[in-house]
Image (cartoon, rainbow, N blue to C red):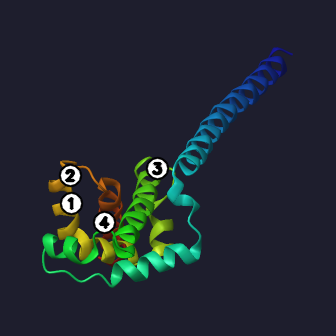
Amino acid sequence: MVDIQTASIAIASAGVLAGVIYYILEIRHQGRIRQTESLIRLSPWFNLNAREVQEAITQVCSIEYSSYSDYLERYSGKPENTSLKMLGNYFEGIGILVYRKLVEPDIVQDFWGGIIPSTWNDLKPLISEMRKESGDAEMFKFWEYLVDRMNERKREVHG
């Protein structure tokens, strides 16, 4: 008799423990969802539609410059400059989501492929000068972080 009672108590205790663990995991999951939703709501850049993002990519990829002063002379106040800032902030937002582990870098890699790293690599000298001029050494730091994670992942997968 004691063995059956002990077994039933052990099974009931295990069920309660499993329920508590599930509840804790569910609370954590809901917290991550709320964080992601908050970041998306706070960032106006995530409200860009596909056409706006594609146009920004096209304009940014067409930028040609020999130096930062040449860039300013050619593009200051023009749509290309606006597109660079829009696209940079959009990728910055994706980088924040990856940094906070709310989105997996693999998903970004699968979706964006080489666009994010190649755009970063093309604009890195320009962004470096923008950081110096503005005194903001962290300008687009999450975009850079995102590129680093994507490059790491690419090396892991392709050796």
Q: Which residue position is annotated with label 4?
A: 152
Q: Which mark is residue 134?
A: 2
- Distance of mark 3 from mark 1, alpha carbons? 28 Å
Mark 2 touches mark 1? (CB < 8 Å): yes
**Secondary structure beneath label 4:** helix
**Secondary structure beneath label 2:** helix
Left or right: 133 in relation to 5:
left
Characterize the local packing of mark 4: few (<14), some (14-19) or many (20 or more) Cα atoms within 10 angstroms.
Answer: some
Q: Which residue position is annotated with label 3?
A: 101
Q: Nearer the viewer, residue 62 or 77?
A: 77
Mark 3 touches mark 4? (CB < 8 Å): no
Q: Quadrant of the N terminus?
A: top right
Figure check: 132 above or below 109: above
Three-letter code for the amino acid on which mark 2 is drawn? Ser
- Distance of mark 4 from mark 2, alpha carbons? 29 Å
Q: Nearer the viewer, mark 2 or mark 3?
A: 2
Q: Nearer the viewer, mark 4 or mark 2?
A: 2
